[in-house]
Amino acid sequence: MGNVTYVTNTTKLDNVAIVTIFADNTIITDMAVNENANDIIEYFKGKGSFGKEDLYAFFKGTGISISDEALRIRIHRLKKKGIIQSVVRGKYTIGQKPLYIHGPDKLIRRVKKLYLSEYNELDYCTWSTNWLQDLMLHIPVRSFYVFETEKDICEPTFYLFKDNGINAYYQPNQEQIDKYILPEENSMMIRPLISRAPYRTIEKTRIASIEKILVDLYCDTDIFYIYAGSELIRIYENVLNRYTINFSTLLQYAERRKRDKEIREFMLKNFSQLVKDIIA
């Protein structure tokens, strides 16, 4: 017998319970998750990261016998409700920090529409350096946009944008960035997209995740040089302090860029108190 999910209606709509009966006859409800939420927060608050075995021990300590499958489902629901958050594979923290999310603005919506009109089946990802301003001490006068797509499509995308009045540049060097991109408003930099780069879909638009942005800032100092040095340290520190970061995602993408060891050492050197229990 497979898993069967039922919806049970009670006298009030806000008391509807989602009940899942597993093949081993373990029963988990959303209400059960809600009832444990405050206890879970209190138990793990201030303890840094914790794993499945810690959650199993917590439930056992409260007199709840739970199977591996039922624990997996309960963890999924706790994550969905924002009670716990993933930091690396198999490790979690109490969900106290928000996600780092920026939605598409007018220009991003426009270039996405242009791009999809020609390359609807291909991958892309976009973001704006303007999003880094509240993470920096010395804020640049100008910001620019980054649009990444498959390598063979970068140049055609560049011409597509230019032909439609977008101030686009294809893989500019530092001199071109200084001379053309930074002095102008709404410049769009076209770059090759590394496969399986992490992004979030917001308003049906693929927006670079903060994990990708952090890795790219570290790796591509020839392009993001105004965000390097002490500013890079400040950006990382502010992100780590303020937002939830999935370190597995960050380090997996860094590995694809062959810089995972460097970035791990960089974080341990500069932010050991924030990351040592997670990536050490």
Image (cartoon, helix red, strand yellow):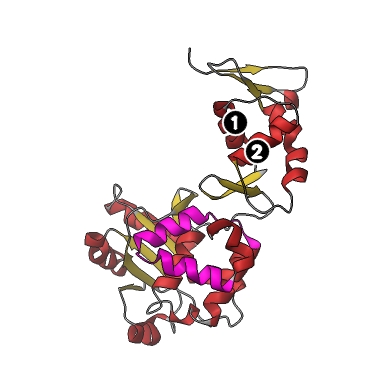
Residue 178 appears left or right of 244:
left
Q: Secondary structure at mark 2?
A: helix
> x, y percentage for residue 141?
53, 83
Disc 2 vs disc 1: Cβ atoms closer than 8 Å? yes
- Part of the protein shown in magenta: 242-270
Residue 177 seen anywhere in this rendered image of the structure = yes
Residue 224 appears left or right of 269:
left
- Under mark 2, the amino acid is Leu
Reply yes or no: does residue 249 show up in magenta. yes
Disc 2 and disc 1: Cα gap in Å? 8 Å
> x, y percentage for residue 16?
70, 23
Residue matched to label 2: 55
* Residue at image point 56% right, 32% down: 72
Residue 224 appears in which quarter of the rendering?
bottom left
Residue matched to label 1: 71
- Under mark 1, the amino acid is Leu
Q: Is residue 206 above or below residue 135?
A: above
Q: Is residue 141 above or below residue 105?
A: below
* Residue at image point 43% right, 70% down: 262
Residue 257 appears left or right of 226:
left
Q: Which label's residue is closer to the chain start, 2 or 1?
A: 2
Q: Is residue 279 above or below residue 74?
A: below
